[in-house]
Amino acid sequence: MEKNHFSRKASTLLSLFILCFHHTTVQCQDWVFKHISNEPPSPSRAPEFKNKFGRIILSMFLGVLTGLIGAILFAYLIRCFIRYMNRTPILKGPVVFSPKIAPKTLQSALANENQLLGSSPNGKYLKAALDNGLIIAVKRLEPFENGSPETQSKSVKRRIQEELEMLASLRHRNLMSLRAYIREPDRFSLVYDYMPTGSLEDAMNRVRENQLQLSWEVRLRIAVGVIKGLRYLHFTCIPQILHYNLKPTNVMLDAEFEPRLADCGLAKLMPNLDRAASGYSAPECFQNCSRYTDKSDVFSFGVILGVLLTGRDPMDPFFGEAASGGSLGRWLRHLQQAGEAREALDKSILGEELEEDEMMAVRIAVACLSDLPADRPSSDELVFMLTQLHSF
């Protein structure tokens, strides 16, 4: 229906332009034929001849101008029609990128009561089992705000769909692969592989409660995996992809504690998506969101590295005290400058053999947490720095 309406409008406009161009051209030809066929004017009729000749020139000029405008508008209409025909259709139902998942099986699995893994202002995290035994994790995003022209627009939905299809094409060991998505009238559900160990946030909470022991080697391997994932987004992907929302809840761990980054780029894609907590956001993000760069991702990584080193939550009230400098980064910088960086380390990872690596890692974290983006290392440089540590 929409395509037929567009075609009728295009045909009507084209016919009007052709008619106008034809009418003007015929007028111009009549003028030329009429005045050229006359006898040469006598001296007494010279002013009248000049006046008629000027009208002929003007008519020819207007005819050419009308034809040029008509040609430009015709080309524009053709271009609009081609773009209209080639635009991405808005898909309905499950869009699956994995051969292990059948659309009907996925729909039936999501229709059942599934295990709730967690929730946030952005939506719910569910665990579901498919008929073939495959376990998946589903991030069901909260509905868009009703009545918002921006979120209800077809162009916005189409842009989200195109971005999700691009994210599904990313392949890296340290990225969560998007296996499928389901577009509903007012929200999206994203399907990922299920990670049995949970998120880095879950693991660090168990460490703080003495329910889990994470050695320095494991923590360093997690840090290296996270920064390798960022390097892939920043330097391999064309165009460059920024994470925008890097924090421990978006770092998933597999059974061997290998990290995988989740929710890459979603905070930019969906304006209502909750961004990283203030403890993980770079200072420039509070001044102007458009100033977000790859160095802003590096700042968030620096906080994660600081969490792995200290075992502390950056939102801990301890960092709100004046003596702590007001943040995890300022606290680490103060201890490093005072030569007391060892006091910041998690006591469960201290050891004579690894202390040199840990001190170097503290210096790397402090560099990432610089207030000025230009003073922070790139993700490419950080991969080299961290993989040079002896324990790795």
Image (cartoon, helix red, strand yellow):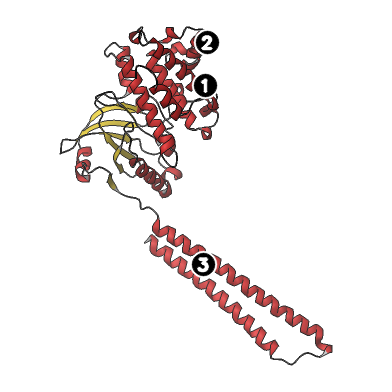
Which residue corresponds to the image point at 37% horizontal and 10% vertical from the top-left?
346
Task: Give above or below for 367 relative to 356.
Answer: below
What is the distance, in whole Å, between disc 3 and disc 2 at their CAs? Answer: 69 Å
Which residue corresponds to the image point at 31% horizontal and 36% vertical from the top-left?
177
> Percent from the top left, x then y, of residue 374?
54, 27
Looking at the rendered structure, the secondary structure element under dot 3 is helix
Residue that badge 2 annotates: 337
Looking at the rendered structure, the secondary structure element under dot 2 is helix
Tag 3–tag 2 contact (CB < 8 Å): no
Tag 1–tag 2 contact (CB < 8 Å): no
Q: Quadrant of residue 213?
A: top left
Q: Amino acid at mark 2?
A: Gln
Q: Nearer the viewer, residue 253 or 29?
A: 253
Res. 165 in view: yes
Q: Nearer the viewer, residue 222 or 104?
A: 222
Q: Quadrant of residue 166?
A: top left
Mark 3 or mark 2: whose residue is earlier in sequence: 3
Mark sitting on residue 74: 3
Q: Nearer the viewer, residue 298 or 220?
A: 220
Q: Decide: few, some or many residues near mark 2? Use Cα within 10 Å; few <14, some 14-19, many ≥20.
A: few
